Image (cartoon, grey):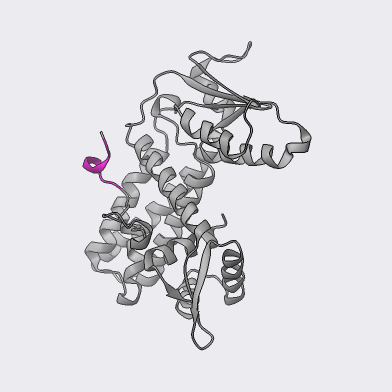
C-alpha cells in the first residue's frame, strides 16, 4: 500500500470518522497535494477500504470500510510479530516451514494470490515455487490453501537442515532467501534520520528555538516510513538468523525516545492531538474491536508477551 494510503487508513481508523475537508488539511501538512489526496481517497473508497457515510456541503465523511478492516487486522498482526521478533520473544527452534506448489497457468490468478499472501506472511523465495519461513505458520498456510481452493496443489514440509552445495548452510541461508542487505541499508538510513530529529528535540530541551511543527510532522513521516518497511520489506526474522548489531534493533529505542521527547516538551498542537496517538499509541477504532480494550501501541519491554 502506498504510504499516502497507509497514512489515510491510520488517521481514519484512529478518528473513527473524519470529514474530507479536515483530512485534506492534515494531509497537506504531510506535503500531499489536494489532487493527490482526493485521488487516494477515491481509490480507497472504490476498493471498499473506506466507506462514505454522509455528505455535508462538499464535505464527504469517511469511515473504515470492510476491506479496510481486513487491512487493519493484517497491519496489527504484522506489527505484533515485528515487536515480538525485535524483543527476542520469537525464538527460532531451528526448524523451517517449506511451502512448495505446482499450479498450472490456467490458475494464474490463484497462483499470484498465493505468492502475494506468502510474501505478506513473511515467507521468502528460495527457488521457483519453494518458499521458506522460520516460523510455524502451518495453520495460516492451510487456511490460505482452503480459501483459494488449491487442495492437492500445495505441499508443506518441516525440516531442520536446508543447504545448497557450494553455499553456506543455515547461518547464511536467510541472506539467500531475503534481501537483508537492502533492508539493512534502509534501516541505517531510517536511524540516521531519527537521530537528526532527536538532535533537534535535544536543542529544544536546552531552551533553543526549533521549528516545532516541522519536527512533529517529520516524526510522523518517519514513523510512516518505518511502517512501510515493516509491512513491505521486513520478514521479521528471529534474532538467530540476523547478524550482530542489526540496525533494526536500534529502531525500537529511537521511536520511544522521539515519542517521549515530543510528549515531555509539549510539542503537540491541540489541533493535531489525535495524530500524536498515531505515534504514541496507534489506537484502533472502538467499533473495530467491540469486545473491550481497543488499543494497540508500540509496546514497552514489560508489555511484550512472555
Residue at figure coordinates x 53%, y 14% from the top left: 169
Drawn side of residue 265 relative to residue 224, left or right: left
Taking 38 as reference, is 126 above or below it?
A: above
Residue 304 falls within the magenta-colored stretch: yes
Position of residue 47 in the picture relative to residue 189 (left or right)? right
Question: What residue is at 57 percent from the left and 31 percent from the top?
Answer: 124
Q: Is residue 62 left or right of residue 267?
A: right
Please provide percent x and percent y for residue 203. Answer: 29, 63
The image shows residue 163 at horizontal and vertical percentages of 58, 14
User: In the picture, residue 209 is in which quadrant?
Assistant: bottom left
Residue 272: x and y in percent read 35, 72
Q: Position of residue 31 (x, y in %)?
A: 52, 70
Q: Quadrant of the C terminus?
A: top left
Q: Residue at x 39, y 60 (%)?
A: 219
Residue 123 on the magenta span: no
Quadrant of the image occupied by residue 10: bottom left
- Side of 168 relative to 77 (left or right): right
Q: Which residues are magenta?
A: 299-305
Amino acid at each position: 500500500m502506498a504510504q499516502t494510503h497507509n497514512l489515510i487508513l491510520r488517521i481514519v481508523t484512529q478518528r473513527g470518522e473524519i470529514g474530507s475537508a479536515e483530512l485534506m488539511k492534515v494531509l497537506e501538512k504531510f506535503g500531499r497535494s489536494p489532487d493527490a489526496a482526493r485521488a487516494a481517497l477515491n481509490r480507497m473508497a472504490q476498493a471498499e477500504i473506506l466507506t462514505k457515510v454522509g455528505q455535508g456541503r462538499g464535505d464527504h465523511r469517511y469511515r473504515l470500510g470492510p476491506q479496510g478492516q481486513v487491512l487493519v487486522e493484517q497491519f496489527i498482526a504484522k506489527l505484533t510479530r515485528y515487536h515480538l521478533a525485535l524483543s527476542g520473544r520469537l525464538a527460532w527452534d531451528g526448524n523451517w516451514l517449506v511451502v512448495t506448489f505446482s499450479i498450472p497457468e490456467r490458475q494464474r490468478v490463484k497462483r499470484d494470490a498465493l505468492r502475494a499472501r506468502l510474501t505478506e506472511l513473511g515467507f521468502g523465495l528460495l527457488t521457483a515455487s519453494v518458499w521458506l519461513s522460520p516460523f510455524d505458520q502451518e495453520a495460516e498456510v492451510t487456511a490460505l490453501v482452503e480459501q483459494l481452493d488449491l487442495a492437492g496443489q500445495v505441499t508443506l514440509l518441516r525440516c531442520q537442515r536446508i543447504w545448497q552445495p557450494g553455499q553456506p548452510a543455515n547461518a547464511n541461508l536467510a541472506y539467500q532467501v531475503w534481501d537483508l542487505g537492502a533492508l539493512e541499508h534502509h534501516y541505517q538510513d531510517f536511524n540516521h534520520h531519527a537521530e537528526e530529529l532527536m538532535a533537534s528535540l535535544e536543542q529544544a530541551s536546552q531552551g533553543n528555538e526549533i521549528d516545532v511543527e516541522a519536527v512533529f510532522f517529520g516524526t510522523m513521516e518517519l514513523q510512516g516510513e518505518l511502517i512501510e518497511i515493516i509491512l513491505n520489506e521486513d520478514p521479521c526474522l528471529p534474532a538467530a538468523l540476523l547478524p550482530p548489531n542489526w540496525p533494526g534493533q536500534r529502531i525500537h529505542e529511537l521511536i520511544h525516545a522521539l515519542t517521549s521527547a515530543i510528549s515531555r516538551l509539549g510539542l503537540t498542537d491541540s489541533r493535531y492531538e489525535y495524530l500524536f496517538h498515531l505515534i504514541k499509541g496507534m489506537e484502533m477504532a472502538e467499533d473495530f474491536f467491540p469486545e473491550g480494550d481497543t488499543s494497540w501501541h508500540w509496546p514497552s519491554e514489560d508489555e511484550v508477551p512472555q
